[in-house]
């Protein structure tokens, strides 16, 4: 009886290996967990200036003042393209309630080879009906017309004229306190 049981266990193990071994390889093709692009820097600016052939931000801000006409500010992305092919970037602009307001759409850009790490900067003006409050910017990349991949989410505070005045008052009182500390009074 023990010999029969040993034979039965060995035959079961061989059957499981024969069926299971090919299943282990199923879906094991080379999968890359590396994103097609990475955001190396994202920031907001209230002004841009032309310098030769390039446009450069003049400052980095943590809040923007909405304007009824014209551009309130700029959203700037510095990206590293890690996969070759055609990259198409878009940004969903979402208000503080979580509702999608609009998309910022950028023209496709071509990354040549996987070996090289091309740097790409995308900038878009922000204008329109931005009411005061927190706004979110969800950045996506679509490589070669495939699925949209979420790269990151950023936010900016849109402030009203009253907030700007109270912020200046806080800065002035902070300066007075710093001066008092420096003078020893």
Image (cartoon, rainbow, N blue to C red):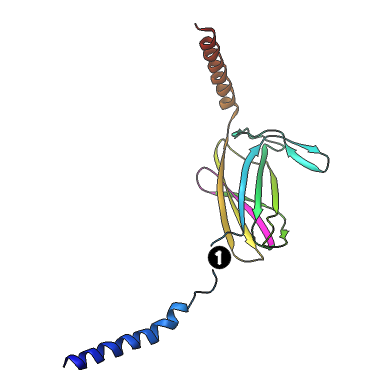
Residue at the image position 74 percent from the left and 39 percent from the top:
56
| Magenta stretch: dominant secondary structure | strand
Residue at the image position 65 percent from the left and 61 percent from the top:
83
Judged from the image, the secondary structure of the residue bearing numbered disc 1 is loop
- Image coordinates for residue 91, horizontal then vertical, percent: 62, 51
Residue at the image position 21 percent from the left and 93 percent from the top:
4
Residue found farthest to the top = 185
Q: From the viewer's perspective, is residue 155 above or below residue 102?
A: above
Q: Observer-nearest residue: 179 or 92?
A: 179
Left or right: 163 in relation to 56:
left
Residue found farthest to the right = 52
- Image coordinates for residue 139, horizontal then vertical, percent: 60, 51
Q: Which residue is mark 1?
A: 32
Left or right: 50 in relation to 45:
right
The part of the image, by quadrant, that contains residue 133 is top right
Q: Observer-nearest residue: 75 or 39?
A: 39
Residue found farthest to the front = 3
Q: From the viewer's perspective, is residue 128 above or below residue 102?
A: above
Quarter occupied by the N terminus: bottom left
Q: Observer-nearest residue: 113 or 60?
A: 113
- Image coordinates for residue 82, horizontal then vertical, percent: 64, 58
The part of the image, by quadrant, that contains residue 168 is top right
Residue found farthest to the left = 1
Q: Dot 1: within a 10 Å radius of its alpha carbon, few (fewer than 14), some, or many (20 or more) residues?
A: few
Q: From the viewer's perspective, is residue 5 above or below residue 175?
A: below
């Amino acid at each position: 009886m023990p010999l029969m049981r040993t034979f039965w266990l060995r035959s079961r193990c061989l059957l499981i290996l024969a069926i299971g071994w090919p299943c282990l390889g199923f879906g094991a093709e080379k999968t890359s967990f590396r994103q097609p692009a990475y955001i190396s820097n994202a920031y907001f600016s209230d002004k841009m200036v032309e310098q030769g052939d390039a446009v450069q931000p003049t400052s980095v801000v943590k809040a923007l003042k909405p304007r009824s006409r014209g551009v309130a500010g700029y959203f700037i992305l510095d990206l590293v393209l890690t996969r070759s092919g055609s990259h198409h970037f878009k940004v969903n602009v979402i208000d503080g309630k979580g509702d999608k307001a609009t998309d910022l759409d950028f023209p496709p850009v071509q990354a040549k080879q996987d070996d090289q790490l091309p740097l790409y900067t995308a900038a878009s003006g922000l204008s329109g009906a931005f009411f005061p409050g927190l706004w979110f910017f969800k950045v996506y990349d679509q490589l070669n017309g495939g699925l949209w991949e979420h790269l990151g989410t950023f936010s900016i505070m849109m402030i009203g004229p009253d907030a700007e005045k109270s912020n200046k008052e806080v800065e002035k009182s902070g300066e007075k306190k710093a001066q008092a500390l420096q003078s020893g009074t």
